[in-house]
Image: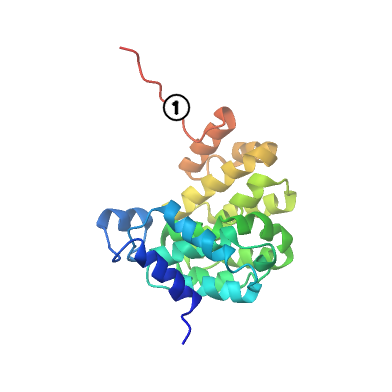
Amino acid sequence: MKESHHLQILSEIKAKSGKPTKHTFLNNYLGNQHPRYPIASPELRAIAKNWARNNRDMTADDYAQVISDLVHGESFTEKLMAGMLLDVCSKEQRKFNPMLFDIWLEQLEGWAEVDAMCTSKYTRTEIQAQWKAWKPLILKFSKSEDIHKRRASLVLFCAPLSQMNDEEMATIVFQIIDRLRSEKSVLITKAISWVLRSMIKHHRDLVDEYLKENSETLPRIAVRETLKKLTTGKKTSVVKKKKR
C-alpha cells in the first residue's frame, strides 16, 4: 500500500530530527502542549519546498487534503508544516474552499500554530482574490467562542493589508477590533497590535485617526506599539548603548 503524502512528509521530518519532545518553557511560550520534533525551521522549510516542487501537478483539493492531514497530526511540527505548505503552493493549488480554515483552526492551539496557518503567502493573495467567500468566514471567526478563531479573524489580515490598499478590508478590521478590544488575553491584544501595525504602510491616515479616537479603550500594548510604529517606523524603541 502506498504511503500517504502526510506520512511521507512526517518520515522526512523524523529522519532529520528524531523523537518528538516536550518542554515546559516552550509549551508556555507557544501556547500548546503538542509534542515537537527537534528540527530547525530552515530545514523544515526545505522539506516543504522540496515536497511542493515534486507535487506541482497536484490539484487544489488534493493539496488541501495533505494540509488537512498535517493539521490533524499530533505534533506541533506537523501543524507548522501545514502552514509552510500554504507558503509554497502554486497559484492553482490555492483555489481550495476557504471554509476548510474553519475546520483546520479547530485543531490548532496557541499563537504559533494559528499564525503559521493564517499569515502565510496564501493569505497575502487569496483573501482578496476570494474575498466573497472570505468576508463572511472571517466575520464568523470574530464572533466564535473559540479564542483561536477570534485571533485568526485579526491576523488573517496582516499579510494582505501589509501589501495592498483595500479600504473595505480595513473597515472590516476596525469593526472586528471594536468587537474584540475589551478582551484581556494576549492572544487578542497582541493580534490587535499586529494588525494595526500591518496596516500602516497603506492605511496610515486611517490607523492614525482610529488610534486618536479610540486610544482610551484599546489594549494598552496595541496603542503603545502602534504609536511607536507610526512615529519611528519600528515596533519598539532601539536602546542605544552608552559608550564607556
Q: Is residue 171 visible?
A: yes
Identity of the residue furthest to the bottom in this view: 1
Residue nearest the observer in this picture, 182 or 153:
153
Residue at 59% across, 44% down:
198
Identity of the residue furthest to the top in this view: 244
Is 32 on the left-hand or right-hand side of 69? left
Residue tagged by mark 1?
238
Q: Is residue 165 above or below residue 185?
A: above
Q: Is residue 27 above or below residue 7?
A: above
Residue at 37% across, 58% down:
31
Residue at 46% across, 80% down:
3
Q: Is residue 185 visible?
A: no
Q: Whole-percent x and y of residue 215?
A: 55, 39
Residue nearest the observer in this picture, 175 or 66:
66
Category of crowding for the residue at label 1, using alpha-carbon neighbours closer than 10 angstroms: few (below 14), some (14–19), many (at least 20): few
Quadrant of the image for the C terminus? top left
Q: Whole-percent x and y of residue 241?
A: 36, 20
Q: Whole-percent x and y of residue 32?
A: 36, 62
Q: Whole-percent x and y of residue 20?
A: 30, 65
Residue at 44% across, 27% down:
238
Is 148 on the left-hand or right-hand side of 75? right
Amino acid type of the residue that numbered disc 1 sits on in the rendered structure: Val
